[in-house]
Image (cartoon, rainbow, N blue to C red):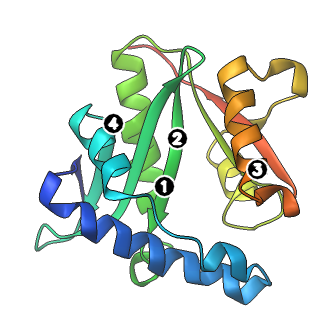
Amino acid sequence: MRIRAARADELPRLQDIERAAGRCFRDIGMPEIADDAPPPLSVLGRHQRTGLAWVAADDADAPVAYLIAAHVDGNLHVEQVSVHPDSARRGIGRALLARCAEHAVDRRLPALTLTTFADVPWNAPYYARCGFRILDDAEIGPLLQRIRRQEAAHGLDRWPRVCMRKEVRGR
C-alpha cells in the first residue's frame, strides 16, 4: 500500500470510500451516520490543493482509503480518515495517520488532534491504540471547541464524542 498525496481527479473516489466506510455504522445502530453525506467535492478539493489530503493507493494506484487534515489551534487536526471496508484491518488507517504525523513534524507542529465517537470500536478505542489520548475540556482550544459545536449542531452529539490528541516527535 502506498501513501501519497491525493489528486484532484480522485476526489469523487474519496466520496465513494466515505460512503462505503460509513455503512459499518448501520450495523451498530447508528444509521444516521451511515446515511450522512460524504464531504463535498469543494471541501475535499480545498484539502487537496493545500496539501492536506492523502490516500492509500493499491497496486493499481487506486485509492482505497484517505485522510484529510487542517490546521487547528496550532496542531494538525485529522478531519476525516476513512478506509474502504474491503481494505480494512490491514494497517492502512495507521499508515495514513503516520503520514499525517510526518507532515506535522515537518511543519514543527506539536500534535495531531481529532474528534470521534467515544464508544465506537473503530473510533476512540482505535485511536487510543494509535497513541491518542482523550482531552479534558480545559485542554480543548477555541477552534477545536468550535468544531465540536458544529458537530453538535449537525446532530453528532446524539452519541458520546471526544476530542483526542497525539503528540508528535521532531526529527
- Tell me which label, 2 or 4, sits earlier in the chain: 4
| Residue marked by disc 3 | 153
What distance separates the C-alpha of mark 3 from that of mark 2? 19 Å
The residue where tag 2 is placed is: 78
* Contact, mark 1 vs mark 2 (Cβ under 8 Å): yes
Amino acid type assigned to the residue bearing label 2 in the image: Val
From the viewer's perspective, tell me whether residue 158 is left or right of residue 111: right
Query: Which dot, 3 or 2, sits closer to the camera?
Result: 3
Among the 4 quarters of the image, the one containing residue 26: bottom right
Point out which mark residue 81 bears. 1
Residue to which mark 4 is pinned = 52
Quarter location, residue 48: top left
**Count of numbered circles in the view:** 4
Give SS at disc 2.
strand
Name the amino acid, label 1: Val
Q: Residue at x 87, y 56 (%)?
A: 160
Of tags 3 and 4, the one toward the viewer is 3
Which amino acid is tagged 3?
A: Ala
Relative to 48, say whether 27 is above or below. Answer: below
Residue contact between numbered discs 3 and 1, judged by CB atoms under 8 Å = no
